[in-house]
């Protein structure tokens, strides 16, 4: 049973609003935590973000009294983190957060996309206390493993998160407060991990959430600066929200015709290749169109791309493709709904009537829309409902109204 009569102040992503008494809120949260773990009831002052996380934790059968499990031993951890993409961002993260953590008796932690802590730095006394709950390098702090916590929940939500005291699902973590923000590959948008700051009640402040988010952006900017220049080993394809796709190949930007856009999208989705007959069925509703037509289109596309990029028997691309619609699908598959919405620039080739493109466009939009409605995040739903493609979506508007009314 869930008490949905939330005060509007608890809709904030900040754990403790200005003027709130930390001790009083801690007591109320502990009583709410007991109510949830004993009877499954969510009551005030639990924020919707935390309520959703507690429910996911319960479905994952996380024990409220357990501790994190160390998954990576010292030798394995050292080799793993040395080769991890986030290792290149650690100097910037330490420079920005190191003194703040030491002076405030906090910890700075960076985890991978699976929630495994790779680096934990900070005040020595605070580190010793954190050791008791296995907040140590090599331990897995994914939400599905240890319940609600800032780095684990930030990975699940793919957005900055602050967790205060008994908002943590596990009781041994109740004395702590933390704020975390996800870290992404600046080139592909892939989720790489999260950066976290952990300490006492003093971190239950809007500034700590804004600070860790700013550090995440600085780390991503550093990764972008350190990224090697394009080598021509992949193609880039943008086909969302536009009728004529944009192809980036070997440093060239090429705006494709509508038919070539459809062909590139189909070949991207079928790296194993497609025969001429398969492409004919996927592209044309008119059964009178002959194979000669598709061969002519492919010949023109080969001249445009160059002979080394488009192969035949079956027709396929010689290089992998980094496509924007693929990014959205991957993020949805990993549960990163906010990141998927951020990458969604609109329907796939909206003017195309090719049967296969229509199916792909409908499927991707439907999956994203369903995920947004299930997530019930008012900001994300508003972004969808107020977009050109969502303006007439009555179901989305109704879902948005329900989230703001509760």
Image (cartoon, rainbow, N blue to C red):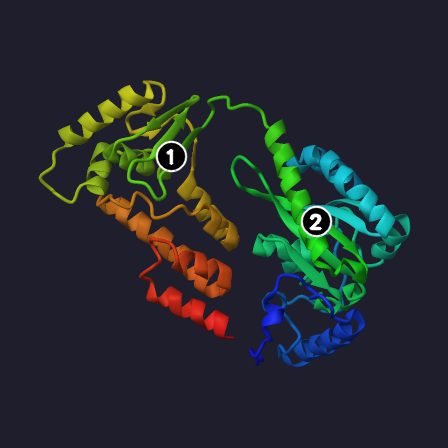
From the viewer's perspective, tell me whether residue 58 is left or right of residue 93.
left
Checking the image for residue 271, the label placed there is 1
- How dense is the environment of label 2, judged by Cα within 10 Å: few (below 14), some, or many (20 and up)? some
- Tell me which residue sits at (63%, 28%) in the image: 226
Q: Quadrant of residue 239?
A: top left
- Tell me which residue sits at (32%, 41%) in the image: 242
Looking at the image, tell me whether mark 1 or mark 2 is earlier in sequence order: 2
Give the quadrant of the N terminus: bottom right
Label 2: which secondary element: helix
Look at the picture and state if 206 lies above or below 75: below
From the viewer's perspective, tell me whether residue 42 is left or right of residue 124.
left
Look at the picture and state if 93 lies above or below 313: below
Look at the picture and state if 51 lies above or below 84: below
- Tell me which residue sits at (80%, 59%) in the image: 202
- Tell me which residue sits at (70%, 67%) in the image: 167
Label 1: which secondary element: loop
From the viewer's perspective, tell me whether residue 239 is left or right of residue 142.
left
Residue 81 appears in the picture as rendered: yes
Q: Of all residues shown, which one is farthest toward the front?
A: 19
**Which percent across, then down, holds residue 348?**
33, 45
Q: Quadrant of residue 164?
A: bottom right
Checking the image for residue 202, the label placed there is none
Residue 115 appears in the picture as rendered: no
- How dense is the environment of label 1, judged by Cα within 10 Å: few (below 14), some, or many (20 and up)? some
**Front: mark 1 or 2:** 2
Q: Of all residues shown, which one is farthest toward the left?
A: 288
**Which percent across, then down, holds residue 380?**
48, 58
**Which percent across, then down, holds residue 334?**
52, 51
Checking the image for residue 211, the label placed there is 2
């Amino acid at each position: 049973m869930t008490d949905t009569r939330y005060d509007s102040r608890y809709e904030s992503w900040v754990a403790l609003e200005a003027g709130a008494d930390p001790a009083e809120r801690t007591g109320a949260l502990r009583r709410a935590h007991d109510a949830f773990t004993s009877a499954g009831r969510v009551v005030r002052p639990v924020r919707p973000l935390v309520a959703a996380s507690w429910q996911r934790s319960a479905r994952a059968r996380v024990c409220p009294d357990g501790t994190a499990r160390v998954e990576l031993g010292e030798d394995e951890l050292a080799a793993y983190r040395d080769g991890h993409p986030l290792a290149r961002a650690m100097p910037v993260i330490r420079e920005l957060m190191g003194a703040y953590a030491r002076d405030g008796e906090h910890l700075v932690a960076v985890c991978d996309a699976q929630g495994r802590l790779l680096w934990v730095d900070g005040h020595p006394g605070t580190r010793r206390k954190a050791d008791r709950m296995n907040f140590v390098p090599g331990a897995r702090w994914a939400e599905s493993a240890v319940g609600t916590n800032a780095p684990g929940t930030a990975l699940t939500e793919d957005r900055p998160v602050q967790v205060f005291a008994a908002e943590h699902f596990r009781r041994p973590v109740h004395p702590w407060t933390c704020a975390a923000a996800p870290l992404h590959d600046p080139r592909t948008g892939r989720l790489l991990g999260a950066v976290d700051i952990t300490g006492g009640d003093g971190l239950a402040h809007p500034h700590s959430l804004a600070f860790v988010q700013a550090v995440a952006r600085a780390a991503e900017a550093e990764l972008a600066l350190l990224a090697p220049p394009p080598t021509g080993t992949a193609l880039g394809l943008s086909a969302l929200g536009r009728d004529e796709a944009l192809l980036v190949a070997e440093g060239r930007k090429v705006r494709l015709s509508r038919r070539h856009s459809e062909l590139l999208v189909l070949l991207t989705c079928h790296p194993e290749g497609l025969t001429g007959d398969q492409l004919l069925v996927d592209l044309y509703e008119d059964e009178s169109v002959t194979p000669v037509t598709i061969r002519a289109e492919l010949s023109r596309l080969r001249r445009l791309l160059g002979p080394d990029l488009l192969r035949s028997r079956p027709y396929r691309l010689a290089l992998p493709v980094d496509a924007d619609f693929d990014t959205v699908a991957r993020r949805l598959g990993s549960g990163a709904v906010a990141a998927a919405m951020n990458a969604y620039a609109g329907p796939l080739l909206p003017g195309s009537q090719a049967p296969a493109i229509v199916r792909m466009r409908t499927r991707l939009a439907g999956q994203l829309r369903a995920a947004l409605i299930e997530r019930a995040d008012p900001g994300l739903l508003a972004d969808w409902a107020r977009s050109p493609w969502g303006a007439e979506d009555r179901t989305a508007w109704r879902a948005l109204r329900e989230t703001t009314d509760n």
